[in-house]
Image (tube, helix red, strand yellow):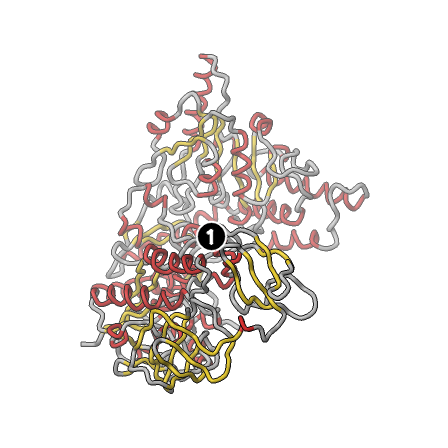
Amino acid sequence: MEAKRTPAINLDFAAATPVCQSALSAMMPYFSEKYYNPSAPYWPAKEVRDEYEAAKARLAQSIGAKAADLVVCSGATEANNLAFTLVPEGTRVLILSTEHDAVRAPAGQCDFEEIKVDKNGVILLEDFRAKLSDRVSLVSISLANNEIGTIQPMAEIAEIIREERLKRAKIGNNLPIFLHSDASQALTLIDVSVARLGVDMMTLNSAKIYGPKGVGALFATPEAMKKLKPVVRGGGQENNLRSGTENVPLLIGFATAAVEAKEHLFSARKKYAELTTLLAQKLAENRIAPQFLGNNKTRLVNFLPISYPGLDAERLIYKLEENGVLISTGAACAARKGEKSRTLTAIGLSDKEIAGSLRISLGATNTKEEILRAAELINAAVNEEHERIYG
Amino acid sequence: MDKTVYLGMSGGVDSSVSALLLKEQGYKVVGVYMKNWSKDLPGAHCPWAEDLADAKRVAVKLNIDFFVMDFEKEYKEQVVDYMLAEFKAGRTPNPDVVCNELIKFKLFYERAREAGADFIATGHYAKSENGHLYRAKDENKDQTYFLYRMSEEALSRTLFPLAELLKPEVKEIAAKNGFLNAYKKESMGVCFVGEVGMKEFLREYIDARPGEIVEKETGEVLGAHDGAIFYTLGQRHGLYVGGGLPYYVVNKDLEKNIVYVSKNLNHEGLWTKEVRLSNLLAREEIPENVEVRMRHRAELISAKFENSCLYFKEPIRRPAAGQSAVLYDGKLCLGGGIIE
């Protein structure tokens, strides 16, 4: 038996999103009456195969790709690990200094170097150029940061890589170079057409876009796809890169959520812009106002990273949880391990600013009333903590 | 001005309720999580970060100050290394006794005093009154067995808010106040060793060699053990020599790495009428007639005490060397020593 809790106002959608109604309904039949193994030889299984492939095509289409360009897997972490399998031995990988562990850990298996960011978390292109040596085979840069929401200028990064390719062709260096981007956080808020972004590989994550957890995909161009190595071996599914019976219901849910997200891109952006502006304004009006981190022109519009230097953000989180507001510091997985935020360190914040920082990320179910109520509760918690420490 | 109490908070229900009670009594309470251990072991996750979060959550709920004191280095050197040395010497030490003596009621006490504490407090079931240590009202949960070595100075400035409460009452207070840890398991010394078992813990640090299990009376080899140090006198389980009546460990030869067992529950190795103590710590003047407890929650046995030796009228099951014998006169804890 646990103590009863009132329904909470969630301001941490960067950690998890609820499955949207359309995805939930779309998935349901595939748990029961359409449970067949897509590889089985009889007609009902063949139907399931067709529906799986059609869903995969819809998912691919939502990023301007074809079904054959996708490897469906268990989520973003696995997709990132798969992307790193194309790195030849003796070559180098570049990642951003603000990358999540799901990029950093696979990079750690290779010789890797970090590219610096500016105070808003945006890549320093001159540092990137300087580190882009002739041995670099993979550049992996998340499209949007998971802690402060910074969006990277992916097309510009892709352009620099295109120049590097030309240069290599000229001097007869035949080491291929690929650009990978983890777009987990971005799919519901920015147009992630792979051609426009210029990426060779992109990680997609259902769990952050109102699809079910436990499913994701790696997009790869045919050139990149050829170089990937299997992470799970077995029956040869997913282009022989990710064996195991297809998880039909999850993929169907994922595809439905992706299509829906794309349809609502503009209305969602408008809504979040209004709500984050309102929230920022209410927090700024308080006796103890936060420091706003990053730059709202270069970040996902549902993010509002703030800091109360001199206060302990963890205490604020517990206090707010008590009053029914869910907020996080940094990435949920790093927070659990009690680690200091890498992103916030990388953008040059002081220990005090980091200790007082909160990650606010809005989601589809947030309403204006919720935001006003949450602002009141945050302000009250901040004032109470300030009172306790400074009298 | 309100008196300041530094309270050790483990994230468990006992220290959480202690925080609440102290606050209600008008103290300025400062919660402290003592970080003694954080390393995971094969097959066992050390939940220190979760415990810390639970403790902090309660502190925030009560709007009290809270911080972490890091004793990992001292805990390893003073508690774990002692424990390993004892096991290597063939004894069965009690790390909680040492932890309380050297970490909680010494290091923590000193740091808290330096930081301006008038008192320290813990969620132990025990009673402190006028510099004397008494068993708690809840006889079933009493923890004075683990506390008998705490210094007099620390005791004179220690509050045990649970002294007069029963565990079910403590749980009820926790539930009533919405402490989410009300139903959590209790913490102990190297708290997760309970989960993996001491054997797995020791295996990480001590290079144990397999050897023979030999029947004492016949000299017959009954089976193999995976390290004599893992076995405690009187132990009945985990021998894997199966069949018929159970075997008991009656002796072990560390040099030859042999564990001797017997089916005979009356074997002389299992019984004794006297127990010699070392490292005696007398909290009080110890009278000739005492009651003694030789394991946490074991029954109290009457004994005569003379020259660091306990004498029993009837033979008792021989206690394991390295454990503590704690002496009482009624509820009053007289002190105790390490069983030789």
Residue appearing at x 40%, y 22% in the figure: A133
Q: State left or right for residue B65 relative to residue B86.
A: left
Q: As drawn, which residue projects farthest toward the top?
A: A171
Q: Specify the farthest residue to the front.
A: B218
Residue A169, percent from left and from top: 48, 15
Q: Circle 1 is placed at which residue position?
A: B206
Which residue type carries mark 1? Ile
Above or below: residue B5 compared with residue A17 = below
Residue lying furthest left in this view? Answer: B1
Of A356 and B204, the residue lying toward us: B204
- Label 1 sits on a secondary structure element that is loop
Q: State the image coordinates of residue A107 (x, y, percent, origin top left).
A: 46, 35
Q: Quadrant of residue B123?
A: bottom left
* Res B272 visible: yes
Q: What residue is rendered at 41% in x and 25% in y? A: A160
Q: How many marks?
A: 1
User: Residue B59 placed where, x, y %?
Assistant: 34, 68
State left or right for residue A88 relative to residue B247: left
Specify the subunit that label 1 lies on: B
A387 w.r.t. A268: above or below: below
Question: Residue at position x 75%, y 48% from top?
Answer: A36
